[in-house]
Image (tube, rainbow, N blue to C red):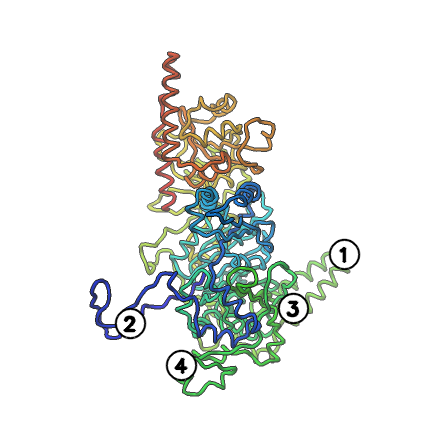
Amino acid sequence: MARGKGRRNPKWKNGSNKTQGGQHVDGERRVYKSFSELRRDNDSFRKYYTAQKIVPEDEFPQLIEAMRTVLPTSFRITGSRQQGSDIREQIEKEFVPFIQQTSIDGEAIEPPHVLPWYPNRFGWQFTIPRVALKKSTELSKFHSFLVTETEVGNISRQEAVSMVPPLFLDVQPSHYVLDMCAAPGSKTAQLIEALHADTAEGECPAGVVVANDADYKRACMLVHQVSRLNSPSVVVTNHSGERFPNIYDGKDVVQFDRILCDVPCSGDGTTRKNVRVWEKWRADDGHSLNPVQTKILQRAAYLLKTGGRLVYSTCSLNPIENEAVVANVLSHFEGALQLVDVSEQLPELKRRPGLDTWKVMTRDGNLYDRFEEIPAGEHGRNRRKYSPKLFPLPAEEMEALHMERCMRIYSHLQNTGGFFVAVIEKVKPITVNEKRKAERDAEAYAAAMAQAREEGDAEAAAAEAEAAEGSAKRAASETPSEADATKRPKVDETDDGTESAMTGNDDESAAAGVSKRVYLPDEPRADPALMENPFVFLESTTAELASIIEFYGIRPTMSQRGFLSRIEKGSFRSVYYVSETVRKLMTLAGPRLRIVNTGIRVFSRNAVRDAHCAFRLVCEGTPQVLPHLSSRFVVDASFHDLKTLLSEINPLLNLLSPETQKKIEDVPVSSSVIVRYDPKMHEDDEEKPATRLTATLALPCWRGKASLSVHMDKHQLRSLIQRVLGRTVDRKEELGYKMSNNRRSNVEAAKAAETPEATEAAEATEAPEATETAETTEAETAE
């Protein structure tokens, strides 16, 4: 999705605001057209990209024609979740065969197909028209499936080419990852999935994902997107990408193993879904974006570890926003950054190499190969707009940079949108602090080798000495000489230890690591309505947290250092949980890092007065807490019990199996309990789920006096009902009716048996618990 700044509405020529019938009568008025009326073409666009020779001349008509067609719908399955394979199997064995046999108005419907280059068959695409998908009776079940699974985070609707950049980052569970321009968050979600790959339920990866966006409202949208993945290892921040602050660990700046720079761009590769790009497109859109994109990429270079990898990407075809940015940044750091050859990775992804030459178009439509060719009067009015940095470097420099290693993805190659991707590796330190750290590491390594030699391990000592010698040579080669110092921008250290590039430009100073303003938690922001209370870590000795840990029997295997909350007037409503790495990062950063949100909610305050514990378990935190919870609060149930809980609202306990009723008797009344269904333990049962399940299901419930209610939001419930019961249900109408009928029949049966105890239990509806479930769900969503 393009994230460039939108243009303002044009001013009326006569300055009149008079209207008649909703139309301007004294001046030029803006006429808005429907998408079907828009001309999906642009003469300047054709002229500009024909001159750039982005594809061979005879192939250009195919590219334009593809860019004028409607974009297929694509989605991917959340691969880090246990149920990912179940979702994939449901698509392959249930929906694909059904759609293959379906036709609308006599025309066959093409079923969803796997994106051949996406790993593990988790990426999918289909060309079913959206209108048909929504209105067709035959396809309504598939549409409902997509909507429901998207709402709970099992599926992400995402453009196919947008899935590409995170795949080339090669994120591992131990990595520190930064997404510099993260909103709306689809790529961030992929980074989180990669971080959690092969991580057991209830455990936290050693790494962290910091998802940043410059716009506070968009950062809040980002929170909603990443919260569906329920990760304790994510921090959402609000900083300008080019001014992302330094975080200090002693003398050293905390750096990242992987950085994604999916920068704001003109978005002219998105014409298949953003039709208005055709009428709004101008060649100089990229001119104004180039400086911002360059500063973001430069800042990323400073924040990247030596040996780390970053990906620079845009949804634009414009070389001014792509190759020009990459070439100038690589040249600026004089060999510290190198393009990575990833031609052997994702071999089924069709792509074209980056450009090493291009032209710049001025406002009058003229094209120029070099800055010097532009007439003086043209760039004299606004020299920055036509900066020399918009043009290619000399041919020999471009060749040395290997710009062909960049990737250009075009719409006609694989039925996608347009995209640009450059994979960059940092091969040596840039700043003085980095070089000093490399020297200290080399010295520490040499000392460790010396100790190994003293201990008499001759063979190991020889190998370690050889490695130490190589490390020392690398450190020496990376130490700047006097000659190098004259070539590079001077790097200085301020009083507080931050580094600044002494180039005479405040923006470039920011790119080198200076955050000119630190936002403290109590400072007012641009929009006071958007302010949040700061996060505060809760000590295990805090009375309410101690009572939660004691009541639910939270084992020491769950670190008690990770609990935090937003404190308001000395109290809090919810308890969140973060990994040890996130806690360390937040502690080191302090007020320097402007945090919008972090962690997963694990406990929420009850609305029930007589509850044994003031807090209950929360659905999103269940996978994190379950492995560490006292077995008293975990009830393994049969499919019959699972079906009952999903088919009824607040089902009476006597509707459950005798075995489950006996287990629930040990659970305190008015408290949370997790009902767990393991399909592997019930493979021989006659009654089974509608679709094959391999992942264990855990339902957080509330144990009332005579009933058991599921504490999940409506989206989670719909998802489970579809997969377990195989049907789409409107819980408010259909299930509400069944609930009242079943309760009525149970009460009547108890009265007929003349058993006062049974009648009292049957008549108990636990209305407070039912009301509390709905109220807290809405409150949690708002919070």
Contact check, label 1 and label 3, Cβ < 8 Å: no
Q: Nearer the viewer, residue 548 or 165?
A: 165
Q: Nearer the viewer, residue 105 or 154?
A: 105
Q: Nearer the viewer, mark 1 or mark 4?
A: 4
Q: Nearer the viewer, mark 2 or mark 4?
A: 2
Tag 4 residue: 382
Q: Please state which amino acid type lies under the numbered disc 1.
A: Ala
At label 3, counting other C-alpha atoms closer than 10 Å, the crowd grade (few under 14, some 14-19, many 20 or more) is: many
> Callout 4: helix, strand or loop?
loop
* Percent coordinates x, y for residue 262 in the rendering: 50, 62
Task: Name the mark on residue 460.
Answer: 1
Q: CA distance from mark 1 to mark 3?
A: 22 Å
Q: Please state which amino acid type lies under the numbered disc 3.
A: Ala
Q: Residue pushed farthest right?
A: 458
Task: Name the mark on residue 11.
Answer: 2
* Percent coordinates x, y for residue 140 in the rendering: 45, 43
Q: CA distance from mark 3 to mark 2?
A: 59 Å
Q: Please state which amino acid type lies under the numbered disc 2.
A: Lys
